[in-house]
Structures are given as C-alpha cells and as structure tokens.
Image (cartoon, helix red, strand yellow):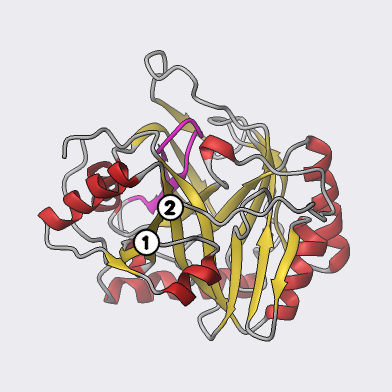
Amino acid sequence: MNLDIFGRVRLGYVLVESRRLDAWRRFGADGLGLHLDATSDDIAAFRMDHHSRRLVIQAGPAEDVTALGWQVDDAQTLQAIRSRLDATGVALTEGDRAEAEIRGVERFWHFTGPKRLSFELFTSPVLDSSRLRMATSGFVTGAGGMGHVAITSRDPDSFLGFWQKHFDARVSDRIEDRLDGIAFDFTFLRLNERHHSVAIAATRGLRLDPIRTRIHHLNLQAATLDDVISGYLRCRELGFRIANAIGQHPNDRELSFYVESPSGFEIELGWNPIVVQDEQAWRTARYRGISLWGHQPMNLDAATRLRRAARGLASLARREFTPLARTPR
C-alpha cells in the first residue's frame, strides 16, 4: 500500500514500569501538574486532555519507559504500516483486552522497536469528558500528539532509517554541541506538524550510550509560560532533581526545563515550540549549541559523571537493536 504516512501518526501514550508509584503520583500530579486518574497498588495513570490515559505507570522493576503508543489516523494507515513491517518479516501482534484497558485504548497492536521498546499502534483512544483536576492551566496535544521523546543511539543512521522507512519521518533540523566534554550530534524528526516527535542523540566518533534508560527524556507541552514557571517551582519545592534549568532551544524555539523523574529518565516541560504549518516552505537547518540560552545543567555532580562514563564504555560491549534498518535518505 503506497500511502504517505506523514501527518497520520502522533505520540499517544507512554507506558513506564516502576516500583516507585507513590513518588510518581507526587511527581506527576503535584510536580508536573497532570491529572491523576486511575490509581491502585499497581497502576498510576495520568490524563492531560480528553484521552483517558496519556502517561501510565505500571508496577515493575524496570524503572524505565517500556512502551510508546503511537496513534494512527485510521485503519488504512494502520494497514499501510503493517504492510511495511510484513514486507521485512516483522509481525504486528494485537494486544489483549486487559492490556488495552491499561493503556486507555480500544485496541492496539505492537512490535519490538528501537532500543527494544514496545512500539504500539492504535486508532481509537478511550475518551473521558469529565473535568480535569490539574495544578496547571492545560497541555497542548491535538494533531501533534502528547509531546516528543529523545533517545540516545549508538547506531543513528539505522535509527533514522527506521523512522523514515516505516513512518515517512522528515528531518526538521540538526544540532551539534559538546555536552560534559563529549561531542554530540542531534537529529530532529517530525511525523506531523509538531516540530519533532523524535529526537536522536549520538556521540560523534566513538559511539557510546551513557544513558541507563531507553529514552533520555519525554517532552510535554504546557499551555502557557506561567505553567512552565510554576511547574519548575513546584518540582524544586517538592525535592525532585532539576536536570536543566529554564532555557530555550535554537531550532524549535521551545522554552523549557528538564526534571529527573522517579525512574531516572527526564521530563522536559516546555512552552510554545514552532509548528511546521507549511511543509513546502520548511528548510532543514543545522545549529551549533543545543540551547540559545539557559538550560544550565543542575545534576551533573562527580558521581553522575562517573556513572555515565562507565555506562558509555559498557555500551561498547553490546549491539544496539534497531529493527529493519536501512541507509537513511
């Protein structure tokens, strides 16, 4: 099926496995300002709009993101992606009813994606029209989805090829910078009008992965600048570690801060990123420096640096998993 998938896919939900559910409840509701909805001994689920579930924390040992749920427009889009997977021998398997309920969707299909994350596709979220109870004015979702994810890769060409082959991803722009003395290249991919739904980070030269978790960060877009500032102050007051203070990126112009989640990966809470409304006029650019201003690192003490260096070296001993990779165009 020769269907252009660009614009038909967006990030729909994120599933995390953690033993720190109480900390996540405080972090999500009191820190980030999300609506804490379903909660039990083994589930903490958060809303941010009319979808019944956007961020789901499930009891388990991983302390990591385990699944990314991608909403596709319709059955035709789902079939087009299935056909691309089938052509290279990857099966798209339907999840069971109980799993779908946890995710807040009517049905979903999954396969093993990059970094062995479960990639999950769905067309119909379960909606909830009840009033949101949030410590913030709101979040921006809609056609661009719930935000973006940033992932460190030791094989960025294959990673890029995966997104282009299966989701018709487009490169928005690239950034190069030195972080903690290491040269990095960043590639930003859009799947729809959101400037990027996926950011790929790679060390230049020797490919290392110093990050313990499968993703570096999950971005959520706040409705107002005041929401970002108040979220920053709440997270600090509650004792959650700020990873990067408030600053602004040069490419999407988003103003944001980064805070460490109870599971170790970071959440970027941002405001007012660029929306790519004219695909014909957009030109891919390259920038030097990940931030125009601000974003000072706040959690890079000597112990953290040592742990990251050790993880980076250890990553050389294992091959990174990326399904169905090909040379990017």
Residue nearest the observer in this picture, 157 or 43: 43
What number is the disc on residue 119? 1
**Residue at screen point 60% across, 38% down:** 291
Q: Is residue 77 left or right of residue 259?
A: left
Label 2 Cα crowd, 10 Å radius (few <14 / some 14-19 / many 20+): many
Q: Earlier in the sequence, mark 1 or mark 2?
A: 2
Q: In the rendered view, tell whether residue 107 sits above or below residue 158.
A: below
User: In the image, what residue type sits under mark 2?
Assistant: Trp
Query: Is residue 320 a member of the stretch shown in magenta?
Result: no
Is residue 20 among what the camera can see?
Answer: yes
Most extreme residue toward the top is 281
Q: Is residue 218 left or right of residue 318?
A: right
Q: Is residue 192 left or right of residue 265?
A: left
Residue nearest the observer in this picture, 191 or 149: 191
User: In the image, what residue type sits under mark 1?
Assistant: Phe
Q: In the rendered view, tell whether residue 178 sits above or below residue 55.
A: above
**Residue at screen point 22% across, 61% down:** 323
Could you tell me what secondary structure mostly forms the magenta stretch? strand
**Residue at screen point 74% across, 57% down:** 34
Is residue 28 among what the camera can see?
Answer: no
For numbered disc 2, what is the local secondary structure? Answer: strand
Residue nearest the observer in this picture, 50 or 320: 50
Residue 71 in percent (x, y) is at 44, 49
Q: In the rendered view, tell whether residue 230 sits above or below residue 36.
A: above
Q: How many marks?
A: 2
Q: Are marks 1 and 2 in contact (CB under 8 Å)?
A: yes
Residue with the mark numbered 2: 70
Query: Is residue 192 a member of the stretch shown in magenta?
Result: yes
Instruction: Find the magenta span and give its range.
Output: 185-204
Q: Quadrant of the N terminus?
A: top left
Label 1 Cα crowd, 10 Å radius (few <14 / some 14-19 / many 20+): some
